[in-house]
Amino acid sequence: MTMISVAEAANLVLAQAVGFGIETIPFLSAAGRRLACDIVADRDLPPYDRVTMDGIAIRGAAFTAGKRSFVVRATIAAGDTPVQIDSDGDCIELMTGCALPAGTDTVVRYEDIEIDGGIATIVANTIKPGANVHRRGTDKHAGETVVPVNTLVDAAVISMAASVGQADLQVWKLPRVAIVSTGNELVDVQDTPGPYQIRRSNSYAIHTVLQQLSIAADMVHIPDEPSESTQRLGSLLSQYDAIILSGGVSMGRFDYVPQALTALGVQMLFHKVSQRPGKPFWFGVYPVGGKAVFAFPGNPVSAFLCLYRYFIPWLKAGTGHADTRIPVAVLAADYIFQPPLTYFLQVHLSVSEAGQLFATPVEGHGSGDFSNLVLANAFMELPAEITNFKKGDIYPVWPFKPVF
């Protein structure tokens, strides 16, 4: 199969995006997930005329008519049954969160009154009728949507769910994911590598990213041996919705992953992408259940880039993320890249005083230099048809760390 463009590869990956169903979970476990249905108000919000300041409740018309002193008939706290007043000369002392007493319509805050001997005197020159009252149903009416479907569950959503009594939330299911490393040169993190071995790192980086997306992925290591590769991958295809492989997909004599996947019936959709890093990226789909197989190159930066450029958009498309916009940034310095490939430049994003997003190149030493990822916070996607990229040019960026 011939090498395809980044845009073609991205479209083929997104075409295989599928939903994984819906599940109901406790609302306190839903942070970071996407809602699979609307959250609706079970009653008006607020459910009563709510006082928003500590002070006294009066009839606003009495102040307008010139009255300044009022007899305090009762003092109530939030949650108390409101007390009614029957005279323009009466008031109720009350606290924030109280229900507005019947017969009143305006709350005068403590800062604007003096209370002495059971008489409250307004010392402010002006009082706005209806002030400091949050009227019933002004936010939402019973049955109205308070949080729409596909919203990311965050602290504000959790607060709203609690306020309407939604102790369980329906969210989009996340895929079951296996992260597979390959290569006889790799040893585990706690092991001492031999002179020509290295510790596994790609799997842990990928696992951490997925963990931040609320996916508890499993990690597996497969040695470079053809029959074991086929047997182990076959077992994984029966258990998981998606498999992410790292290594074993280039053209080397011991890169057995593509032939093992083909033998298992995984349909290859592409193998090489016209990009750097990550050219040997292999992608396919297992017809039984439409399971996606992402086989990334073993070089750390290549695997990291492919995860953010291809896997995460695929994941979002199947889990309720409606916003598919890609942010752009201003290139902060001239840059030259001559090969006719889409280049994913490691950059450090920052925000100018004017609010513009700027991308400063972070030079590294190729796709094996994963230490450079500590300094950068995004990839800038530079198009293949351009060689000289000028300061001030605007291109898409793929952030992998918070910018602020």
Image: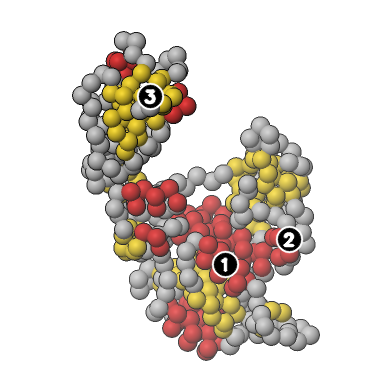
Residue 147 % position (x, y): 35, 46
**Which residue does the numbered mark 1 point to in the structure image?**
208
Tag 1 or tag 3, which sits nearer the N-term?
3
Q: Residue at horizontal 69%, vertical 60%?
A: 373
Q: Closer to the camera, 74 or 146?
A: 74
Q: Give the structural element (helix, strand or loop) at label 3.
A: strand
How busy is the neighbourhood of tag 3: few (under 14 within 10 Å), some, or many (20 plus)?
Answer: many
Residue 281 % position (x, y): 58, 66
Which circle marks residue 372 in the picture? 2
Disc 2 residue type?
Asn
The span from disc 3 to disc 2 (Cα, nearest Å) is 68 Å
Disc 1 residue type?
Thr
- Can residue 1 be seen? no
Q: Give the structural element (helix, strand or loop) at label 2.
A: helix
Residue 15 % position (x, y): 42, 57
* Residue at the extreme top: 65
Tag 2 or tag 1, which sits nearer the N-term?
1
Residues under numbered marks 3 and 1 in contact, where contact means CB atoms less than 8 Å apart: no
> Which mark lies nearer to you, 1 or 2?
1
Residue 295 % position (x, y): 55, 70
Which circle marks residue 120 in the picture? 3
Q: Residue at horizontal 33%, vertical 48%?
A: 163
How busy is the neighbourhood of tag 2: few (under 14 within 10 Å), some, or many (20 plus)?
Answer: some
Q: Residue at horizontal 35%, vertical 34%?
A: 94
Tag 2 or tag 3, which sits nearer the N-term?
3
The span from disc 1 to disc 2 (Cα, nearest Å) is 17 Å
Which circle marks residue 331 in the picture? none
Q: Closer to the camera, 45 or 246?
A: 45
192 vs 295, left or right, is right
